[in-house]
Amino acid sequence: MSSPSRDELAFGLGTVVHRDPSAQPIESPRPYVHPLRTPAGTVVSDFRPADHMWHWGLSVTVANIRIGDAAHDVNLWGGVTWVDGRGYLQLDNNGSQTVDETQTVDGTHLTWREADGSVFLREERMLDASIRDVDGRSVGVLDISSRWTNLRDVEVAFGSPTTAGRPDAGYGGLFLRLHPNFSGARPLSPLLLDDPDATLHGTEAAWLGLESGPATVVMGAHPENPVSPTPWFVRNDATPMLCAAPFFHEEWKLRPGESATWRWRILLSDSPLHAERVTHLLDEA
């Protein structure tokens, strides 16, 4: 059966866009969730902001993917690519993630492609939305499972601009471009319990969140992910964003024919969440 261009998450937590007919190749077209909402309907995501037109709500996206000994990385983030010694360049290397024509009860099947359409990876993705009660308040929970299989007969390496030579730019993984209201948001992390001045950007932790007014967003990475604990890419300035960034500091490689599964959980709240509650919500089944 032909898959629809979009679906609604349960409990009104967001819209999943499988295909965007307005997408340009330079944006590295891929499925995304936007708007992403709290249980009360507050939108926490942003889409195509003026500073980065390829920031599309919530998506699985990787900036630097090297297939074998190819001359240039595949860019599944969008826009320019960091080339060591030359800086950011717009190359003809923006790939895409395409949704296959069939969907099953097991989730959405996707194909990762190079700029010329060549297939290199198969993904099986599941999104599951639910509501949890926390002291009489509703907290939205979005579980994401993503299984990757290397379809090539060479190793595929997943990296970031930092692994390509640019310091402090290790973005890529599960990425959420946040609503402008999260500019100046208060960071939340288990690391802050022991050190209120702890550095969060680029640091490994079980989870990370931002609180802005009534809205709180927390992203957690499963401890059994191929890279664990995960480093984080986070900004709470004029370009707020939150990214579980497993390839921040080092490349991670998938050998020919091998598969690996990534799991993440996002919490969406209309009120502040204490660290103990966050840990409980991320750990419970």
Image (cartoon, rainbow, N blue to C red):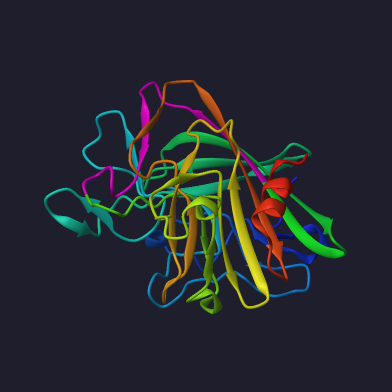
Q: Is residue 167 left or right of residue 127?
A: left
Q: Residue at x 72, y 70 (%)?
A: 271
Badge count: 0
Residue situated in front as seen by the camera: 16 or 144: 144
Picture quadrant where residue 11 is located: bottom right
Q: Quadrant of the N terminus?
A: top right
Image position, residue 146 (x, y; %): 60, 39
User: Would you place residue 229 above or below residue 50 in this image?
Assistant: above
Image position, residue 129 (x, y; %): 76, 53
Image position, residue 148 (x, y; %): 54, 33
Residue farthest to the right? Answer: 136
Q: Residue at x 48, y 76 (%)?
A: 183
Residue farthest to the front? Answer: 194
User: Would you place residue 224 above or below residue 118 in this image?
Assistant: above
Q: Is residue 8 left or right of residue 152?
A: right
Confirm whether the magenta stretch covers residue 231.
Answer: no
Residue situated in front as seen by the camera: 223 or 94: 223
User: Would you place residue 88 above or below residue 153 in this image?
Assistant: below
Residue situated in front as seen by the camera: 68 or 118: 68
Q: Residue at x 11, y 50 (%)?
A: 85
Magenta segment boundaries in residue numbering: 144-165
Image position, residue 282 (x, y; %): 69, 46
Q: Quadrant of the C terminus?
A: top right
Confirm whether the magenta stretch covers residue 155.
Answer: yes
